[in-house]
Image (spheres, coloured by chain):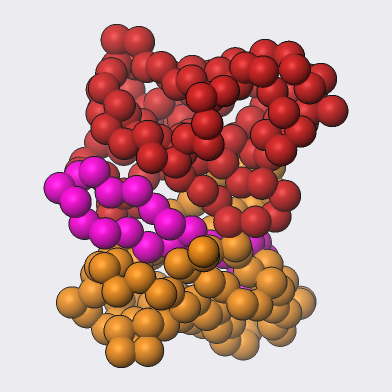
Amino acid sequence: DQQVKQNSPSLSVQEGRISILNCDYTNSMFDYFLWYKKYPAEGPTFLISISSIKDKNEDGRFTVFLNKSAKHLSLHIVPSQPGDSAVYFCAASVTNFGNEKLTFGTGTRLTIIP
Amino acid sequence: EAGVTQFPSHSVIEKGQTVTLRCDPISGHDNLYWYRRVMGKEIKFLLHFVKESKQDESGMPNNRFLAERTGGTYSTLKVQPAELEDSGVYFCASSRLGGANYGYTFGSGTRLTVV
C-alpha cells in the first residue's frame, strides 16, 4: 500500500524550460512534505519542504505547490539547468514531536537536455 | 562539518551469511535513521534512534535485522542470515533538530547484494 506516489518514472526537459514533477499522496494525516534530489551513488539531498498550512513555498529556482484537497503536490524548477538532472523523491511525514519518519515515493528521473 | 558516513559502500554476500553495515552520523546529531531502497522502488523507513534508544522500529522487516547504536554515536545494522530479498541500498541519515521535517542528511548508502 503505497501512500506516496510518483506516477512518472522519468521526465525530459529542455535546458532553460520549466520542469514540473508531480506527487500524489493518500494519507490525509500527512502534514509535512519534502522533496529530495539524488545523484547516482550518493544519498538523497534535501531540496525544499512545505507544511500543510501553506500552499506554496519558494526557494530560488525551486517552488513547491501543495493542493491538499487533491492530495497533490508538485515541484517546479525554473529555469532548468543540466545540473538538475537527477532522481527526485517526494516524501511526506506526520508531525510527531521530533519522531517523524519519512514516507517516500518511488522517484522521478529528471533529464535536462542541453 | 563532516557528513554522514556509511561503510562498506558495497557488499556482496551469499545467502545465509551475515553482514554488518555501519553508519557514522554527523557529530552532535542525536537522531539517526535507517532506510532501504530495493530495486528502484521507494525508499522505505526501517528505524529511528534518538541517541542510543530505539524510538521507532516499525519498519524493520523481520527479526533477521538487528540495529544498535552504542553510546549514541555510530550505529550498526546487522542482517543475519541474509536472504535474497534483502538486496538493496541501505541509507543512514541523521539530524540535530526535531526529526524528519527539517530535512535530515543522508549518507551515500551501502549497496548490499545477496547472491
Asked whether residue B114 appears in the rendered view, the answer is yes
Q: Residue at x 18, y 77 (%)?
A: A53
Apparent side of residue B30 relative to residue A23 in the rendered image (left or right): left
Position of B91 with respect to B75 (left or right) is: right
Decide: is A14 above or below B103: below
**Extreme right residue here?**
B115
Q: Where's residue A75, x and y in %?
A: 47, 77
Apparent colour of chain A: orange
Q: Residue furthest top?
A: B71
Q: Locate residue B12: give its quadrant.
A: top right
Instruction: Chain B: give its colour.
Output: red
Q: Position of residue B6 (x, y in %)?
A: 55, 25
Q: Residue furthest front?
A: B63
Image location (x, y in percent) of residue A31: 25, 68
Residue A96 part of the magenta segment: yes
Q: Is residue A42 above or below residue A20?
A: above
Q: Residue at x 65, y 56 (%)?
A: B41
Residue nearest the observer in this picture, B58 or A82: B58
Q: Is residue B31 magenta?
A: no
The quadrant holding residue A33 is bottom left
The answer to whether residue A65 of the structure is visible from this angle is no
Q: Which of the image's four quarters has the C terminus of chain A?
A: bottom right
Identify the residue at image location x=55%, y=78%: A21
How far across and how far down the image is residue B78, in percent?
A: 56, 18
Residue shown at 51% from the left, 65% from the top: A2
What are the residue bounds of the magenta stretch?
A81-104
Quarter where residue A71 is shown: bottom left
Reply above or below: A101 against A57. Answer: above
Q: How many marks?
A: 0
Q: Nearer the viewer, residue A3 or A98?
A: A3
